[in-house]
Image (tube, rainbow, N blue to C red):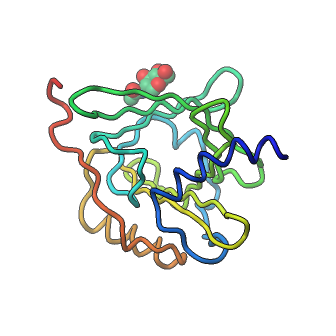
Amino acid sequence: MKASFALFLPLLLSFCSAQIPHWGTCPEPPLQPNFVLKKFLGKWYEVAKLPAQFEKGRCIETNFSMKADGTIRVASSEILKGELRTLEGTGIVEDVKQPAKLGISFSFLAPYSPYWIISTDYDKSALVYSCTDVLRVFHVDFAWILGRTRTLPAETIEKAKEIFTNSNIDITKMIASRQQGCDKEI
Ligand SMILES: *[C@@H]1O[C@H](CO)[C@@H](O)[C@H](O)[C@H]1NC(C)=O
């Protein structure tokens, strides 16, 4: 317990510097009913996000695939200062009764961060939410709109924002991700 808190702390501090924490505990948004992980696998582009300090690059995309051991391979990439950077993490379903609640870790030292699929049609867009309670006094959260394409129609983004807002998730600081000039030579 003590050890895991010590490992958690640096992550927490980086979260705190990246995001203004909200008072109270995490909201409990409704998640995608009957979520089917298999249909969610493959490549997703980051279309919009609540600003996250650890993601400064552009052309951010993530490819989810199953590993032989039943965990999820999470391969992300971004272009930062003209260079393609890749990052590989591991995803798990912590409770089979709640299949839309994934946990993702980008280092075997770090705990799994929540990665909840709030809504998805599997072939166009997905809404993802991550929230961590801090001492049950405040919480820090992240939200993403993902697309199977680098950009999504404005109506889709509006609808996505409505779903977040209706779930008590404050997305007023959400910004569009930079997905321009990604397919050219770097
Ligand atoms: C995603 O990763 C899997 C496993 O490495 C690979 O087979 C697949 O081609 C990748 N998909 C895309 C779209 O890059």
Q: Which residue is pictured at 15% across the width and 38% down the height?
A: 181
- Residue 104 % position (x, y): 61, 41
The image quadrant where one finds ligand 1 is: top left
Q: Which residue is pictured at 65% across the width and 77% down the height?
A: 24
**Quarter-wise, where is residue 116 in the image?**
bottom right
- Tell whether 131 sits left or right of 82: right
**Quarter-wise, where is residue 182 in the image?**
top left
**Quarter-wise, where is residue 55 in the image?**
top left
Q: Which residue is pictured at 27% across the width and 55% down the height?
A: 152
In the image, 103 versus 38, the foreground residue is 103
- Tell whether 47 sits left or right of 18: left
Q: Which residue is pictured at 52% across the width and 43% down the height?
A: 40
- Residue 147 % position (x, y): 36, 49
For the C terminus, give its image quadrant: top left
- Residue 143 % position (x, y): 47, 60
Q: How many marks?
A: 0
Q: Residue furthest top?
A: 68
- Residue 185 % position (x, y): 15, 23
In the image, 76 versus 152, the foreground residue is 76
- Tell whether 130 sits left or right of 163: right
In the image, 42 versus 80, the foreground residue is 80
Q: Residue furthest right?
A: 1
- Tell whether 90 sits left or right of 142: right
Is residue 11 placed above or below 50 in the rendered structure? above
